[in-house]
Image (tube, grey):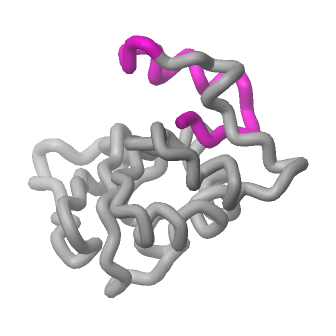
Amino acid sequence: MVVSSNAEQKAAILFFKGLDWDGDLIDFDFPVQGQVEADNVSLLLLADEADKTKEPLLTVLPLARQKNIPIVTLATMVEVGEAIGWNEPAKIASLNKGKSYIGTVINTLNQAVDAPKEEREP
């Protein structure tokens, strides 16, 4: 399932094979719950630019938690933490190292870690 309001961003995650970009796209003009509750949903990709991720993330997160569906996002873990709260449990992984932080979440956002200084961009 691809969650995106920006079609161009889908190209950044084409390495996930077998996705039907039309059939697996959540349409925010319709109720999201029924779309995410389909039995075949096993991964949610938030394919928006990092600064546009908050609203889609907050929309799908409760259902993802309920069904134990992992979320992959292009937002940094810092942006994810700011969007949903640092102590909220979730299965979220970031594909974006960001400018200052590298973070990957297994079960909780508390596990996001600061990148070593030599890996930070100026």
Relative height, residue 10 to residue 43 (above, below): above
Camera-nearest residue between 90 and 118:
90
2 magenta-colored: yes
21 magenta-colored: no
Camera-nearest residue between 36 and 87:
36
Relative height, residue 26 to residue 108 (above, below): above
Camera-nearest residue between 116 and 32:
32
* Picture residue at 41% right of the left edge, 63% below the top: 67
Relative height, residue 117 to residue 80 (above, below): above
Which of the 4 image quarters holds residue 27?
A: top right
Write the start and end of the magenta stretch as one range.
Answer: 1-18
60 relative position to 84: left or right: right
38 relative position to 16: left or right: right
Q: Is residue 95 visible?
A: yes
Relative height, residue 6 to residue 114 (above, below): above
Count of marks placed on residues: 0
Which of the 4 image quarters holds residue 86?
A: bottom left
Residue 80 lies, in percent from the top left, at: 45, 64
* Picture residue at 10% right of the left edge, 54% below the top: 116
Residue 71 lies, in percent from the top left, at: 40, 51
Q: Residue furthest front?
A: 39
* Picture residue at 73% right of the left edge, 33% below the top: 6
Which quadrant holds the C terminus?
top left
* Picture residue at 67% right of the left edge, 24% below the top: 23
Camera-nearest residue between 6 and 107:
107
11 relative position to 116: left or right: right
Q: Residue furthest bottom?
A: 87
Q: Is residue 74 visible?
A: no
Residue 1 lies, in percent from the top left, at: 53, 36
